[in-house]
Image (cartoon, coloured by chain):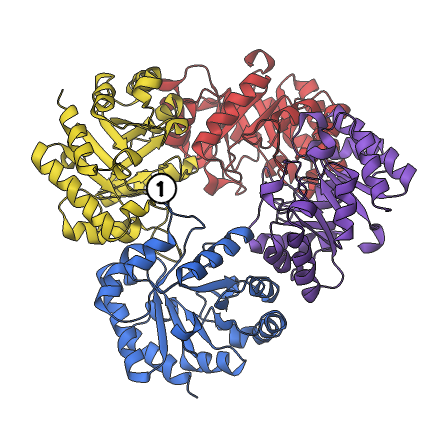
Chain colours: A yellow, B blue, C purple, D red
Amino acid sequence: MLEKIQTPMIIVNFKTYLEATGRKAVELAKKAEKVSNETKVFIGVAPQFADIASIAKATKIPVFAQHVDPVKPGSYTGHVLAESVKEAGAVGTLINHSERQLKLSDIDEVVKITREKGLISVVCANNPNISAAVAALNPDVIAIEPPELIGTGIPVSKAKPEVVTDTISLVRKINSKVVILCGAGITNGEDVAAALKLGTQGILVASGVVKAKDPYMVLREFAESTKL
Amino acid sequence: MLEKIQTPMIIVNFKTYLEATGRKAVELAKKAEKVSNETKVFIGVAPQFADIASIAKATKIPVFAQHVDPVKPGSYTGHVLAESVKEAGAVGTLINHSERQLKLSDIDEVVKITREKGLISVVCANNPNISAAVAALNPDVIAIEPPELIGTGIPVSKAKPEVVTDTISLVRKINSKVVILCGAGITNGEDVAAALKLGTQGILVASGVVKAKDPYMVLREFAESTKL
Amino acid sequence: MLEKIQTPMIIVNFKTYLEATGRKAVELAKKAEKVSNETKVFIGVAPQFADIASIAKATKIPVFAQHVDPVKPGSYTGHVLAESVKEAGAVGTLINHSERQLKLSDIDEVVKITREKGLISVVCANNPNISAAVAALNPDVIAIEPPELIGTGIPVSKAKPEVVTDTISLVRKINSKVVILCGAGITNGEDVAAALKLGTQGILVASGVVKAKDPYMVLREFAESTKL
Amino acid sequence: MLEKIQTPMIIVNFKTYLEATGRKAVELAKKAEKVSNETKVFIGVAPQFADIASIAKATKIPVFAQHVDPVKPGSYTGHVLAESVKEAGAVGTLINHSERQLKLSDIDEVVKITREKGLISVVCANNPNISAAVAALNPDVIAIEPPELIGTGIPVSKAKPEVVTDTISLVRKINSKVVILCGAGITNGEDVAAALKLGTQGILVASGVVKAKDPYMVLREFAESTKL
């Protein structure tokens, strides 16, 4: 999977924000693509399920689902099938975001399904211990996000740098290959640079970009800051 | 909402069947549209979230989501927002399918959300008592499906006609307007005619159409049988 | 079931408050029993599972579980079996409390199980519509508790009397026998009297009693107020 | 915590079996205590919540809850509080049994709570990867149980010895102290001896004891076989 992804990487989670739903999701994805083309930094977007296909058609940006269910094709009304998001154009998926947490065995199952289907798995974790637990499941990417900082504008890299360094240290004892991102509270380039300086390989961001007055400018600043 | 829907009505639930995912979902929806045009019978399809937009673009058939979450726009990663499926082209949604059951208060919340957003609510129920409970929440449509018959090819209208008639009787004491469908085990026109004869106003079907050798022919037979 | 219960009734939910855990749960139950003996008002207590047996041994007060799972005896580790709480001494159970909500079909299943096992079912509901839905499932008791008022000290009978009267009106159209309680925010006798004046047959209370400086005095006031 | 527990250890999960509910739960616990006294092998029992106190009073056998919720004292109706099961007499708890699985972050939270409260944490895991993930959370005990073998009478130590040895190998890379049990399908002393020979430090058993014609004899055989 890793040949498809580069580090540093930035993933923008569109959540269920109206500013990133439907037509606006496509517009935002185009801005992200523009920044990626201009800066040569890997930027992925994670829109709602119903917007995956439109974004995949309108752009070449890597698209991630926000969640995939631990199910195979069959009688699972209302579930999110890996095959479905892949055919719609997704290259990967977030898993276990703090707003959509899974049972441990379901995380394991979804990671396996993504591996079989050739999708990039980005598993979110709340703290260093949980990150280490996730590392044992061998996903492609771990994103550490202290839930208490999500949406606050207080970046984990500043407020709790030890959360990031402890995560890296615990994860690396178990898994030398997994890409480590951090998230929560990132609003400017300085936060991004700080995150990378602490040893992460990128960031997962949501409101900091989606709710920004000028998402293009913010993302551009983020991307440039990965090069500092 | 009811001006948008006609009875008798047929809704085809695509579940997460591979035969009804991605490109194949669009093809199946086109067949359903053809039958609807030829027979003038209301046929809706309920594909996976990622296929709603493609089907809505490729056809004029009414598209239903398979599920909507009880959330407003905001920080809800991996959730299904009513606004999102509506902008993608859905005219309604299944709610509380036996494979995606909800807490009672969430059913109430989603029914309210669909009403605000102008989406048709189709709430599934397992038995007559539960159908009566659902009727008190004032959805547009109730679909009674005994879960033990789903996918069996044994139609509820034959195996347990009293489930259907009890449902109608209990529901009508509480709610005179809601459209009542029945589902589970329907595979041929005879089953459809039996369901309507018992007093329902249509059917919810999945494998009987999706897994059929010739879905067009089966749906055509279903549609004709609503006129008997 | 109704021969076992009297109205007006007061049920005290011990939640997982430390003030009502273990030895302190037994003490609190004894105070409730004292008030019940003195006032001849029906008072039940709903302690944590592990305290049911001790309270049932130490008092004659009616004990309710706070929750029962929709399972039969068998391979269900960590579940709460109706048979188990009954043998421990419970005479009934809360179901679907807003802090322990259930899928609609599970509420139906648990109500059926309690009926089979001779346990009093007290189903909680958030609003009038949901109360009406619950009424269709024929429990013994419905407790309407607007979750936004729980623990606030603002009684529903004052803040939202129309919630109570709408509930009574909707429920009675569907079910003439079910006992209707109201809860949330009740802290003094005046609130209790107001609740009964609106047409309820009792109250469900938690912090108003458990966290009171003198639970005996508060309960005594509650009980007396049911006679006004 | 480990000073309280000895290895080899046997834990008998009473599940919600009627044969191990209420008065019968106490009787079964007494048999287990007798075997433990006679053989000097550590035997714990995990009864339903409502039976913890009675067993703790009637015996000196170590009692485990079957589950604890990730909550602190407060407004959590129907939840299982660590403080409550501890005061009732439990010395530990099962966590994440395959019949009561938890979100990853909740496992982490419950392990922390048990540590704070001085309870022994026994976290169940479905497969070697999940066992390794659990090991990163530093519980006292891990019990590996392939869910497909639970209740079958086919012991994992025979059917899938590599599951056990892989688990031990993966877990030990991450955590050198955690006690490793295996479970599922164990019905006789040979199975127990096989489990220990593969490197585990004991077993988690349910129907093999609870549903046995003579639970005392079976447990006695199990205990003796840990000495082979």
User: In what quadrant of the picture does the N terminus of chain C appear?
Assistant: bottom right
| Residue D45 seen | yes
Left-right relation of D201 to A82 = right
Can you give x and y, in whole percent of width and height, for residue A88 in the image? Answer: 22, 53
- Quadrant hosting residue B133: bottom right
Q: Nearer the viewer, residue D76 or B47?
A: D76
Most foreground residue, B85 or D136: B85
Judge whether residue A87 can be spotted in this image: no
Instruction: Say left or right for A89 vs D200.
Output: left
| Residue D180: x %, y % from top left | 48, 23
Circle 1: is it few (<14), some (14-19), or many (20+) Cα within 10 Å? many
Horizontally, residue C220 falls left or right of residue A106, namely right
Image: C46 above or below D59: below
Total numbered labels: 1
* Residue on which disc 1 sits: B77
Measured as percent of width and height from the top left, residue A204 is found at: 27, 32
Residue at point 57% right, 20% down? D120
For residue C65, above or below residue A145: below
Tell me where residue A175 sits by quadrant.
Answer: top left
Q: Residue furthest bottom?
A: B228
Secondary structure type for disc 1: loop
Chain of the residue under label 1: B
| Viewer-closest of C217 and C134 | C217
Residue kind at label 1, given as amino acid type: Thr
